[in-house]
Amino acid sequence: HNAAVQVYDYREKKARVVFGPEMVMLGPDEQFTVLSLSGDKPKRANVIKAICLLLGPDFFTDIITIETADHARLQLQLSYNWHFEVKSREDLADSAALFSVPDFVGDACKAIASRIRGAVASVQFDDFHKNSNRIICSAVFGFDQKLAVRPFLRFEQNNLVISSVDIQSVEPVDQRTRDALQKSVQLAIEITTNSQEAAARHEAERLEQEARGKLERQRITDQAEAERARKELLELEALSAAVESTGAAKAEAQSRAEAARIQGEAAVNEAKLKVEAQRIEAEAELQRLAKAREQELTYKQQKDNLEVEKQKRLAEIESERFGQLVKSLGSDTLKEMARAGPETQVTLV
């Protein structure tokens, strides 16, 4: 799986690539192409014999010797991650390109080593020791148009892609350089330790100063808070005293107002009762007068009735007397009596 083999026909002088897993039957003139790859560390040719070409991803490790601009020789152990990038397995040219380089491991290691040697030869040992990863990655992958390190390195001959470089170790070849490097490393460690101690001491002093400042500020803040609380307490005491005096005065005023209100209501009720008594007395007097007037009217009416009855009876008696008188005198006598007066006057005249 994830591998390819090349089958070569000697009669036709043609090769075909088969990707696994797959079962194939070789023709009478076909044979597998045996790969002879480099191996070991540092890389040596013809170490690995293989029929299958693994497509990756995988890695191989190499040890190379470099020399800086100040002639410091170093031994690098590098590990490369790689894989083959096959765009289309049906494309015969793209598939055949996988086997175009017989020893892709050795060729890739040589090409990468030459790039690293060329890049390291132009820098000083101190610069390489500080920026080894950046120098090696930029040497292997190169730069794009924006001057940024490319993410991979592609070999166009067989579509081999180197995706990353890992620096496993950097050791000086010369013993004197190794001793000097060890001494410089120890000195750097000592300087770093001293600087870290000084930084830690300064940081501790700074933290102590900050803590003192915070404590002093907190003390001042607490004093200000206490003064503020004492001020609020005094204000509340004054307010409570004012409220107490105001409450007493208010209670006294309310009691006076309540007493005045009660007296006023009592006076109003007394006046109402007096008015009601007067009204009752007036109504009683009015009823008494009405009864008296009614009785007096009844008395007068009865008296008038009696008087009318008396006059009526007298009139009847007079009428009866006059009728009897007329009747006793006669009508002729009355006529003569009536004529006697005028005639006497006429005679006198």
Image (cartoon, rainbow, N blue to C red):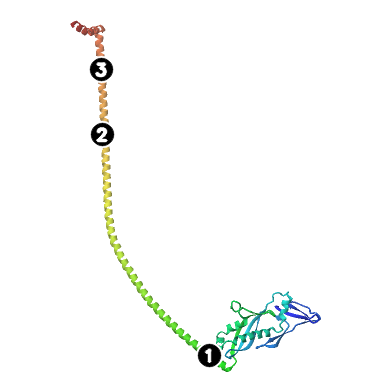
Q: Answer above or below: position of 25 versus 278.
A: below
Most extreme residue toward the left is 348
For marks 3 and 2 on the same chain, the one whose residue lies earlier in the sequence:
2
Task: Return the disc, 2 or 1, that comes first in the chain's sequence.
Answer: 1
Task: Name which residue type carries label 3.
Answer: Ala
Residue at the disc numbered 1:
184
Query: Amino acid type of disc 2?
Result: Leu
Q: Is residue 323 left or right of residue 40?
A: left
Vertical comparison of 169 with 286: above or below: below
Cα distance in 3D space between marks 3 and 2: 37 Å
Regarding residue 20, the answer to whether it shows in the image is no
Q: Nearer the viewer, mark 1 or mark 3?
A: 1
Along the horizontal axis of the image, is 270 left or right of 205?
left
**Label 3: how many residues lie within 10 Å, few (<14), some (14-19) or many (20+)?**
few
The reply to whether the C-beta atoms of the residues labelled 1 and 3 are less than 8 Å apart is no
Name the spot of residue 297 as percent of width and height, x first: 26, 29
Q: Is residue 200 left or right of residue 121?
A: left
Q: Looking at the image, which is closer to me, 301 or 112? A: 112
Q: Secondary structure at mark 3?
A: helix
Tell me which corner region of the image, top left, top right, bottom left or bottom right, holds residue 124.
Answer: bottom right
Would you name the residue on which mark 2 appears?
289
- Near mark 2 (Cα within 10 A), the count class, few <14, some 14-19 or many ≥20, is few
Specify the amino acid type for callout 1.
Answer: Ser
Q: Which residue is mark 3?
A: 315
Judged by depth in the image, the label closer to the viewer, 2 or 1, is 1
